[in-house]
Amino acid sequence: MRYGEQADVRQAFSANYFSGSWWGPESLHYEEVKRNLLDFKKEEENEHIRLWIDEYVVGLDEYIQQAKIREERDAF
């Protein structure tokens, strides 16, 4: 929270937050991550964390769209 105004800190946090694995369609995974973050944001008061969530959600939207295209192409 202390250094959240720095873009490189937010990017590093995103890289750490994004690691992990899941089962099932990729798009559903990203949609769930997005929902969880938006729910968390409702209660969050720190402006740096809210900024990180906003930036991360934009990236998630891109991942979701790309995943849906791949899933449609691969008939997942």
Image (cartoon, helix red, strand yellow):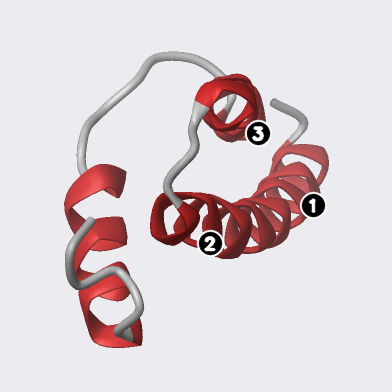
- Between circles 1 and 3, the one closer to the viewer is 3
- Looking at the rendered structure, the secondary structure element under dot 2 is helix
Which numbered disc covers residue 51? 2
Q: Amino acid at mark 2?
A: Leu
**Residue 25 x, y percent position in the rendering:** 59, 23
Residue at horizontal 65 percent and vertical 34 percent from the top: 27
Question: Which of the two labelled residues, at mark 2 and mark 1, occupies the earlier sequence position?
Answer: 2
Quarter-of-image position of residue 4: bottom left
Cα–Cα span, label 2 and label 1:
28 Å
Residue at horizontal 30 percent and vertical 47 percent from the top: 18
Q: Which residue is mark 1?
A: 69
Density class for disc 1 (Cα within 10 Å; few <14, some 14-19, many ≥20) is: few
In this view, the residue in front, 41 or 36, is 41
Question: Which of the two labelled residues, at mark 1 and mark 3, occupies the earlier sequence position?
Answer: 3
Density class for disc 3 (Cα within 10 Å; few <14, some 14-19, many ≥20) is: many
- 6 vs 50, left or right, is left
**Residue 57 x, y percent position in the rendering:** 63, 51
- 12 vs 35, left or right, is left
Q: Amino acid at mark 1?
A: Ile
Q: Amino acid at mark 3?
A: Ser
- Looking at the rendered structure, the secondary structure element under dot 1 is helix
- Looking at the rendered structure, the secondary structure element under dot 3 is helix
